[in-house]
Amino acid sequence: GGANVTKTLVANFSEELKIPEQSEANKIKYFKIYRWDPEQQQKPYVSTYPIDLDECGPMVLDALNMIKNEQDPTLTFRRSCREGICGSCAMNIDGSNGLACLTYIDQDSPQATKVYPLPHMYVIKDLVPDMGNFYEQYRSIEPWLKSKDGKVDGQKEFLQTKEDRNKLDGMYECILCACCSTSCPSYWWNADKYLGPAVLMQAFRWIEDSRDDYTKERLENLDDAFKLYRCHTIMNCSKVCPKNLNPGKAIAKIKKRMSSIH
């Protein structure tokens, strides 16, 4: 009986003092982040930051925000929606391209999480790549509906059947984050001439659209040794897409459609 009383007293005493058990000790995770400031006249380097996981949200973007807010306000990266719809926070995390807001912090690994900008892109500062070439390529495919006759009087919309609309599923959801294009070795070596998986999938989105009247012209525009045919079906693009789309499949369908104009 005396032993039980002692156990109860010890338990109550522990609760009052809130003595943390071993498992409740601070969980520190280190982040090694690529840094480069063009104004500092020095080579790129890697900075290491400790993060208490008990104080931080579950995503890599939460950690980056915490570092910027509490440790180093000079850390520069793009972010906006924090829910995987804007594509701003695309970066290379532990060797794989992804959105920081959709990538969970690896809490089980004792290794530091490595965060770099998207590979083989010109860096503006820290984790911010220059997307200018990517957007120019997107502009080049004319990503809008083109009609030869326009609308007739009283017509409000260009209609299409449900079946035709379903053909666009898996393409219209692309958020142009460039995770796929910058994971593609063909794009690394020929970014000036090869359009890359993201832009090619958007090109096919308009080729496949039953409401568009310029299908033949769109295909002819892509009929080029570099624009389309640098794709060697490595399929890194489909592996890393944060929206689980399949750019490689869309490119294969363009190649198939290309035979119809020859």
Image (cartoon, helix red, strand yellow):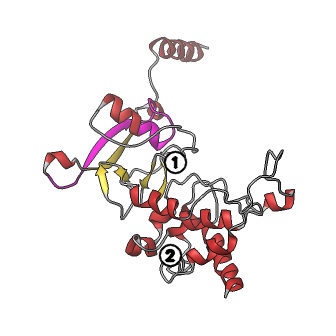
Amino acid type at circle 2 is Lys
Region rendered in magenta: 42-63
Please state which of residues 256 and 8 is positioned toward the viewer in this rendering: 256
Residue type marked 1: Gly
Q: Is residue 70 magenta?
A: no
Disc 2: which residue: 227
Residue occupying the point 51% across, 43% down = 101
> Pointer 1: what residue?
87
Up-down relation of residue 215 to residue 230 (above or below): above
Quarter that holds the N terminus:
top right
Q: Is residue 233 visible?
A: yes
The C terminus, quarter of image: bottom right
The Cα atoms of the two marked residues, 2 and 1, are separated by: 24 Å
The percent position of residue 2, horizontal first and vertical second, equals 57, 13
Measured from the top left, where is residue 17 in percent x and y? Answer: 44, 13
Residue density around tag 1, few if under 14, some if 14–19, many if 20 or more, within 10 Å: many
| Residue 60 on image: x %, y % | 46, 43
| Residue 77 higher or lower than 91, as above or below | above
Q: Is 244 situated left or right of 42 in this image?
A: right
**Which label sits on residue 224?**
none
Report the residue at 30% width, 51% height from top.
Answer: 124
* Label 2: few (<14), some (14–19) or many (≥20) C-alpha neighbours in 10 Å: many
Secondary structure beneath label 2: loop
Residue under the image location 77 percent in, 52 percent down: 151
- Comparing 262 with 45, the one in front is 262
**Closer to us: mark 2 or mark 1?**
2
Does the segment drawn in magenta span residue 58?
Answer: yes
